[in-house]
Image (tube, rainbow, N blue to C red):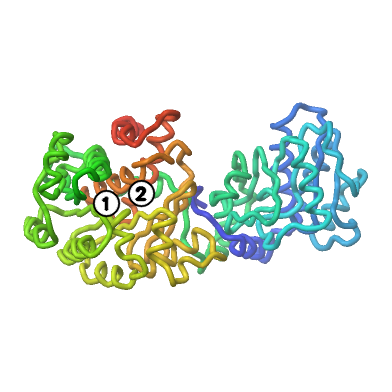
Amino acid sequence: MPSHRLITVDAMRRMDEAAIAAGVPGIELMRRAGAVVAARAAAMVPASSRILVLCGPGNNGGDGFVAARLLERNGYAVDLVCTVPVESLTGDAALAAADWQGLVLTEADPVGAALVVDALFGAGLSRDLDGAAKTLVERVAANSVPVLAVDVPSGIDGDTGALRGVALRAHETVTFVALKPGHLLQPGRDHCGHLHVADIGIGDAALEQGLAGTPTVWRNGPDLWGGAFPRLDAISHKYTRGHVVALSGPAFKTGAIRLAARAALRVGAGLVTVASPAAAMAENAAHLTAIMLTPCETADDLDDLLVDERLNVILAGPGLGSGEATRERVAVAAGVGRSLVLDADALTSFKGEVDQLASLVADGGGQAVLTPHSGEFARLFAGTDAVDPEASKLERTLRAASIVRAVVVLKGADTVVAAPDGRAVINDHATPYLGTAGSGDVLAGLVAGLLAQGMPAFEAACAAVWLHGDAGLRHGPGLIAEDLPEMMPKVLSGLR
C-alpha cells in the first residue's frame, strides 16, 4: 500500500476481516502487531528497564499482552495492567492474554517506569474516556513517563483526531498498515509523537476490499503531485510558463497582493502583473521590479485587460476589499474561463452566498482554488453542512469542495486540501512559525504560480501547501512572510 494513503477506522476493520477470511488467523495478525510494538519499545529504552504495559478490553489490549510477553522474554521487567478482568476478554484478545504468564495488575504505578506502552484503546474510540480508564490515563499523564502508543494514543479518535475527554501524549505511536486521518488532524497529531507504520501482512486483496468505497485521502507529499510538477526544458521561456494577474486593493492596502505576486513569480510563473487602482499605482511601483504593473480600477477594466488570453490565472482577494466591487471582479474573472485563486476578501465578499460563487465558478469553466482560513471558511459556508461542528476538518473541507465545485484549501496547523471529486490530503509538513501576518497571501501566490505553469488545480494546491510548509521548516525561528518567497530557490532545489 502506498505510504501516503490514509485509511479510516472502518476500512482498517474491513481489511482485518478480509485478511482473516482469506486464511490469516486473527491471532496471527495480533501476534505480528504485538511483535512490532515490542520491537519499538525495546528500541526506546535500555535492556532490563521496567516497562508498564496498559491493556484495554479489545484487540488493542491483545496487542499489549503480546508485546508484554515478548518484552519479558527479552529481559525487561514488565508490569501489566488490564482495565477489565482477564476472564471477560473474548476472541483473539483472550487468546493473547492466555499466553501471558505473569501477573495482571489492576492498579498502575508509573513511578519508576522507563516506558509506558499504551494499549488501552485503539483508533476506533468514539466516546469520551470515563471511569477507571480516565483515571488511569490521568495518572500516567501526570508522571511524565515516555509513552509508546499502540495504534493511536488512548483518548484520540482515529478518524477525526478529536480528543475524547482526556488522552495520553505519546513520544511515539506505532500503527499498522497505514496512517489514519486522526494521526494527522489536530489535536490528534500533537498527541502522537513520532509516527511509525508497520506492515503486518494484511495482503493486497484485503487492502483493496477495505479501501472500497472509502474517501481517497492522502498524507501530502511530493510523491502525490511530483509527476505533475512543472519542469523546464531547453525551449521554455516566460510565455510558456504562464502569466498571473494579481488584483491589488486600494492605496495603503497593497502589501498582501505584492507578497502573493512575488510568491507566484518565485515558484516559476513566467510573468506576473499586479492590476492596480490608479491611487495605488505609485505605492505598488515603488516596490515592484520584475513584477509588472498595470492600471485596473473596475470590473470593466479587468474585463478589458483579460482580452489578452495569455493571462491565464487571476489571483483575487489579498487586500482587495470586501463588497460588491470585489464580487463583480470575481464574476468577470470567472466568466472568461481562466484559472482562479480566491483568498481573503474575495471569499468574505461572498459571505453566506456560496451558491452564487459556486455558480460563477461552474459557469466560467475554469479551474478554481479557494484558500480560506477557519474564519473565512465559516463566513463563506454559513448555513451549509460544511460548518457542522460535529464533523472533522477533513469531512468539512470535502463537503465545502463539493458545494462550491472548486478545490478548497482549509488552512491551519493541519491544512486540508479537498477537490470536488472527493480526493483530499492532510498536510503535516509545516511549522508553527508559519503563523505570521501575510503567510496566507504567500500561499495563495504559490498556488497561482503553479496553476499558471499548467498544474491541475488539486495538484497545484497540494504542492503549494507543501512548498509553503517546507519554506517555513527551512527558515525556522524569526520567519516573516517576506522570507517565504525568498526561500523558494532552496525549496525547489531540494525538491528536484
Pick the residue in front: 205 or 418: 418
Residue 339 position (above or below residue 429) = below
Q: Is residue 496 visible?
A: no
Q: Residues within 10 Å of mark 2 (few under 14, many from 20)?
A: some
Residue 351 percent location from the top left of the image: 35, 65
Is mark 1 in CB contact (under 8 Å) with mark 2? yes
Q: Is residue 119 left or right of residue 253?
A: right
Q: Which structural element holds mark 2?
A: helix
Find disc 1 in the rendering and name its residue: 455
Q: Is residue 7 left or right of residue 491?
A: right
Q: Residue at x 38, y 55 (%)?
A: 372
Q: Amino acid at mark 2?
A: Trp
3D distance between C-alphas at marks 1 and 2 = 9 Å
Q: Is residue 319 visible?
A: yes
Find disc 2 in the rendering and name its residue: 225
Q: Amino acid at mark 1?
A: Met
| Quarter containing the C terminus | top left
Q: Residue at x 63, y 50 (%)?
A: 176
Q: Which structural element holds mark 1?
A: loop
Q: Is residue 252 left or right of residue 167?
A: left
